[in-house]
Image: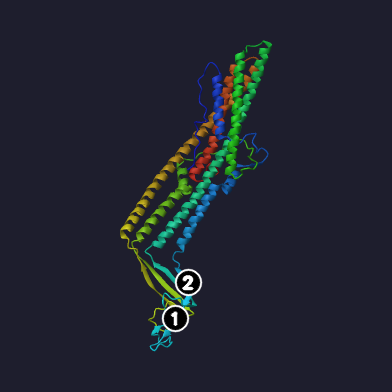
Amino acid sequence: MPMHLPRSSSMPRAVPRRRTAGPRLLAALALLAAAAPAHAQEGKSSPAATGLRLTLAQLITQARQKYPGVEAAQRALEGMEAQLYRAKWAWLPQGQMRGFVAPSPDIKCLDQNGKPSTTNCFSTTSVDARSFNISGILARIELDVGVPLYTFGKLAAARQAAAAGVDLRRELVRATGDDLELKVTRAYFGLKLAREILRTVREGKTHLVKAKEKIEKDLDDGEGDSTVTDLLRIQTFTAEVDARIGEGEKGERIAHAALGMMAGLTGQAFDVDSAVLDPIPGKLDRVGAYLQLARQHRPETHMVAAAVKAARAGAAVEKAGFFPDFVLVAYLGYAVATSADDPQNAFFNDPLNFFGAGFGLAMRWNLDTVQQVGRYRAARALARETEARRAEGLAAIDLEIRREYLELAEAQTRLQATDRGQKAARKWLVATSQNLSAGLAEPKDLTDALLAFFQLRVRYLQAIHDVNVGWAVLGRVVGLAARRIATP
C-alpha cells in the first residue's frame, strides 16, 4: 500500500507575536530545516550537477527496468507460471523407466533326463548363492506408464488454483511497480521542494547580510538607532541560516543517492530536469468516480479476487480427495542374459530373459478419511476467511481513496491561499528591506517581515509539493497514473 508523508513535519505553525523577533525567526528557520532535509534529494553542490538530466517519466522508466524489487516480483511470477504449466499438463502420461546392466550367472535348462533343453525345461543347473558363477552379462529395462482418466475434479481444481496464483503474482508485479513509481515521484518532487526552500533561505540571507552591513555602518558612524543588540541578533540569525543551509544540502545529497538507487543510477552522474516546481493542473472529480476506477484498475482489488479464487480451488482439491482416481496403466519390459537359458514356458517367472507388455484400468484411492476430513475443513475455512478478508480489503481501499481525495482537495485549497499570502509577504519583505536601508525601519521590522515571508513561502512550496504528490498518491490508490486522473 502506498506510504504517505507526514504533513505535520513541514507545515509552518503560527507563532505568537512577541516583543523580540529572534525566537520567531529562529522558529521559521527551524521550520525550513525540518522541511528541507525531510524531502531533499540533491543540492547545488551535488556531484550530478554536470551529469545526465532526467525527467520524472525517464526516472520512472529507469526504476521500473532496474529496481531489484520489481525484478524479484517478476521472478516470482515466472515461478508461479511454471506451476501453472505443470497443472495444465498434468493429464499427460506419467511413468517411470528402470534399467540396469549386471553380471549374469551361468544357468542351463535340463529335461527329465538331465539333458539341455529349453522347450522341456524340467530343472536347471545348480546355482549356489555361495558360489561365484559369473559368465555373462544381464541387461534389463522396464517402463511403467499411467494416464489419469477421471479424478473427480482434482486436475481441474489444481489448474484453477495455479491460474489464480499467476493472476495474483501478475498483479503483485503491477503493484510493486506502481509503489516504486510513487516513491520516485515523491523523491522527484521532494528534490524540487528542497531546492526551492534552500533558494528561499539563501534569499533571506541576502536581506540579513544587507541589514548587518547597515547596522555595522551605523555603529561605526555613530548614527541611527541601531544598537549592538541588533547587530548580535542579526549575526545570530545569519549563523542559524548558514547552519540550516548546510543541513539542507546534506539532506539533498543523501536523498539523491536514494533516487539513484531506485533508478539504477548509483555511481553515475545524473540530475533531474530544470523544470520549475509548479503545481499539476487538474480538477478533482466526484469521489465515487475514483472508487469505481479502483475496482477496475487497482492491482490490489484484482489480487484479493485472485486470492479468493485460489482458496476456493484449494478447497475443491481437498473435497475431491475423498474420491479415487481412475488411471489407465501400461507396462513394457525386456531382459536378456547372455549366459542363462530362456525356457519356453509361459508359467515360468524368468527375471533373466523375458519380454512383456500389457495395459489395464487401475484405481488409486488414499483411504485416510479422517485426515482428509481435517484437510478439507481447513481448506474450506481458509476460503471463507479469504472472502471475508477481501471484503475487509475493499473497504480499506475505499477509505484510503476517500482520505487521499480529501488530502488533495485540502492541498489545492491551501495552495490558493498560500499563493496570495506569499506574494504579499514578499512585497512586505522587499519594502521593509528598502526602508531599513533608507533608515526608515528598524531591524525588528526586517525580522518580522522575514519571518512572515519564510512562513508563507515555505507553506506555499509545501502546498505545491503536496498537490503534486497528492495526484500521484490518488493515482496509486486508484490504479492509474496521476496524469490520467488529473482532469482538466
Q: Amino acid at mark 1?
A: Ile
Taking the image as shown, residue 1 lies to the left or right of residue 449, namely left
**Position of 33 relative to 126 (above/below):** above
Density class for disc 1 (Cα within 10 Å; few <14, some 14-19, many ≥20) is many
Quadrant in the picture for residue 39: top right
> How far is disc 2 from disc 1 in space, using C-alphas?
22 Å
Q: Position of residue 204 (x, y in %)?
A: 62, 25
- Residue at image point 39% right, 53% down: 311
Answer whether labels 2 and 1 touch (C-beta < 8 Å). Answer: no
- Few, some or many residues within 10 Å of mark 2 (<14, 14–19, 20+): few
Q: Is residue 357 above or below residue 455?
A: below
Which of the 4 quarters of the picture holds residue 199? top right
- Residue underneath mark 2: 99
Q: How far from the left and from the top, in percent, is residue 103?
A: 48, 75
Measuring from the top left, give residue 296's x and y in whole percent: 47, 49
178 or 243: nearer the viewer: 243
- Residue furthest to the bottom: 113
N-term-proximal mark, 2 vs 1:
2
